[in-house]
Amino acid sequence: NGLVWVRGQPQDYDTWEKMGARGWGWRDLAPIFNRIEHFVDGDGSNGRGTEGPLKVTVVGDQNPLYDALFDAARAAGYPVNPDYNSLDQEGVVKTQASIYQGRRMSVAHCYLEPARRRSNLHIVTQAHVTQILLDGKRCTGVTYRRGSEQFTALAHETILCAGGVASPQLLELSGIGNPQILQQHGIDVKHALPAVGENFRDHLNARIVWRLKDPRVSYNHMARGLGAVTQMMKYVTTGTGFMSLPSAPMLAFLKTDPAMATPDVQMHLVPYSIKDPKTRKLQDFPSMTIACYQLRPESLGSIHIRSADPLAQPSIRFNFLSDPIDQRAMVDGFRMMRRIVATAAMDRYRDAEVSPGEHLQSDHDILEWIRANAHTAYHPMGTCRMGPGSDAVVDHKLRVHGLAGLRVADASIFPTMPSGNTNAPAIMVGEKAADILRASHALQKRIQGELEVA
């Protein structure tokens, strides 16, 4: 992930609860977010966690371009927010990142590493799960490949955490899903569940690039020649510098319509630009980028298997911008990026817009350019949607509808898109799943004890 730490808006989770996900409202999840994080730059007075395993820090990088962008945002009429992970997300901000002393605070580092020597934990690496095993309507375990060998792992309960892309794929490979899709690929239908792979949402990222007058505030030169060597040494010796930054050192959560209750677009303000997205090489000239995506897209796509081969990649249908609400938000967000950079506060640094260029002015032309040039933000979710109805895959306790012994706990269960990057909400799902499992096991033990007494 981009190391950007965003909880989302309280309204996101209250919406989940209203849609039938009992126990997933903000009042239930705020304590879990606090349990996860150790907000190093906070004192706990704003309702943030200070004792969790995952350290979160505010980007400390100093650059006069950041100051100019803050001034530009104010001049354009947008607020500055000291903590977008508090109850109010709106504003232009320094990014809070899952980074501490230059190191990524990953789940592997913060959760798995401290637990890896436990006797009841067995970690298998370089393994590819190929099928979920069912005995009637009960899950009994999985099969997986490691190199050329095939293995079976049996369990009383299996928790699928393969993510928004691979979780629906694995369900379908195992005969769980839409019968028409399964039969099309010669897979026996073991459990009909048409919602598998549907409700797919992702963030669509549109970028504007400006050439800058002052090369000292652009980081493009830092990835080449002596600059790259200097930054590498700085990172190795002090854990600071360009290589210690998240994908965006500044963010903005803004409303495209002031009448809205909460922000509907997110911007990433970056003091560099990419020449070639495939190679990730930086531009040869000093520049900056602002990227924008709609926080809660309405457009729905799907992810389904394209064959019965578990090693084949699934078919991903993004269906971006199919909803008029999304179209309007992206065009308005595009204009807001331009409005910020056009203020007098940026005169000292702004040279010219180089992509797409100032010739692009009408709503129609902007929308068509976005269709042709915007790309995924790599936030796939919703494909094993949580809810009570036939349009859902799991219930509020993450149990796959109609099956025993199988749960899903990853971003695929999100009913709707959280307002922001999806890493923090995905970790929250893991913590919530642990609570659910502990409560379930405690109940089973109590019932067993009562039966033995009786």
Image (cartoon, rainbow, N blue to C red):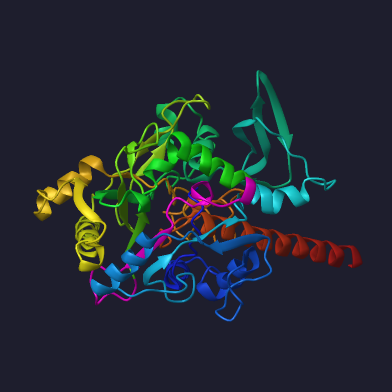
Rendered view: 224 above or below 67: above
Q: Which one is nearer the viewer's eye here, 91 or 318? A: 91
For image coordinates 80% across by 65% down, the residue present is: 447
For image coordinates 77% across by 40% down, the residue present is: 122
Rendered view: 129 above or below 431: above
Q: Is residue 265 magenta?
A: no
**Is 388 positioned to the left or the right of 159 in the image?**
left
Rendered view: 180 above or below 321: above
**Is 386 positioned to the left or the right of 134 in the image?**
left
For the question of whether residue 90 can be seen, the reply is yes
Q: Which one is nearer the viewer's eye here, 101 or 385? A: 101
Question: Looking at the rendering, which quadrant does residue 313 occupy?
Answer: top left
Q: Is residue 259 magenta?
A: yes
Q: Position of residue 357 (x, y in %)?
A: 16, 47
Q: Which one is nearer the viewer's eye here, 4 or 256? A: 4
Q: Position of residue 356 (x, y in %)?
A: 19, 45
Furthest residue toward right: 453
For image coordinates 47% across by 55% down, the residue present is: 422
Image quarter of the C terminus: bottom right
| Magenta residues (range) | 237-262
**Is 113 positioned to the left or the right of 268 in the image?**
right
For the question of whether residue 161 can be seen, the reply is no
Furthest residue toward bottom: 45
